[in-house]
Image (spheres, helix red, strand yellow):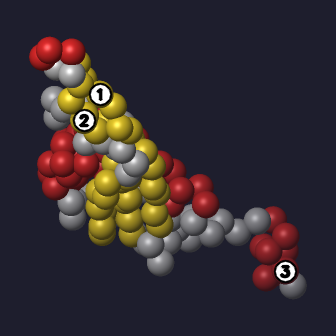
């Protein structure tokens, strides 16, 4: 079973985020975070936050082992666009869009063995 995390309406153009997402596609989570720490692009921080969120979901909600987590899928899609105007020559205005992106990260790994509590140990001994 895979675990996902989604960041919606990140205020960076989807084309710029997709370049950074392509750097870490198919890598392990730890390798991807190291690569993103050394990437000098603003979108690297947004992708890193989404990967860390997916890792936290896997560890705390789905009981995965921290070693061996792999990024199986990372996709970037366009979010909403804010329509704005920029002043132009002779008192006119030129329209432009402030674009945003949705980042979706899916990771997979191995399940952690559940620790036996005192109650289950006592039941096994009987």
Q: Give the residue number, with chain letter if any, for mark 3.
A: 123
Q: Quote the CA–CA distance across marks 2 and 3.
A: 68 Å
Compared with 70, 50 (above or below) is above
Q: How many marks?
A: 3
As drawn, is 99 to the left or to the right of 110? left
The residue drawn where x is 40% and y is 48% is 80
Marks 1 & 2, CB-CB < 8 Å contact:
yes
> Element under label 2?
strand
As drawn, is 81 to the left or to the right of 88? right
Which numbered disc flags the more N-terminal residue, 2 or 3? Answer: 2
Which numbered disc flags the more N-terminal residue, 1 or 3? Answer: 1
Return the mark for residue 96.
2
| Residue 66 percent across, percent down from the top left | 43, 56
* 47 vs 94, nearest the viewer: 94
The residue drawn where x is 21% and y is 64% is 26
Compared with 64, 76 (above or below) is above
Q: Give the residue number, with chain letter if any, for mark 1.
A: 85
Rendered image quadrant of residue 70: bottom left
């Amino acid at each position: 079973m895979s675990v996902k995390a989604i960041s919606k309406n990140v205020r960076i153009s989807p084309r710029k985020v997709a370049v950074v997402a392509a750097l870490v596609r198919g890598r392990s989570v730890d390798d991807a975070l190291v690569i993103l720490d050394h990437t000098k692009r603003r979108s690297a921080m947004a992708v890193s936050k989404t990967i860390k969120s997916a890792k936290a979901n896997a560890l705390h909600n789905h009981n995965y082992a921290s070693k061996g987590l792999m990024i199986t899928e990372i996709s970037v899609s366009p979010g909403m666009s804010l329509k704005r105007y920029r002043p132009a020559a002779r008192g006119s205005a030129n329209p432009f869009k402030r674009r945003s992106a949705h980042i979706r990260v899916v990771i997979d790994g191995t399940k952690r063995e559940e620790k036996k509590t005192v109650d289950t140990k006592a039941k096994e001994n009987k």
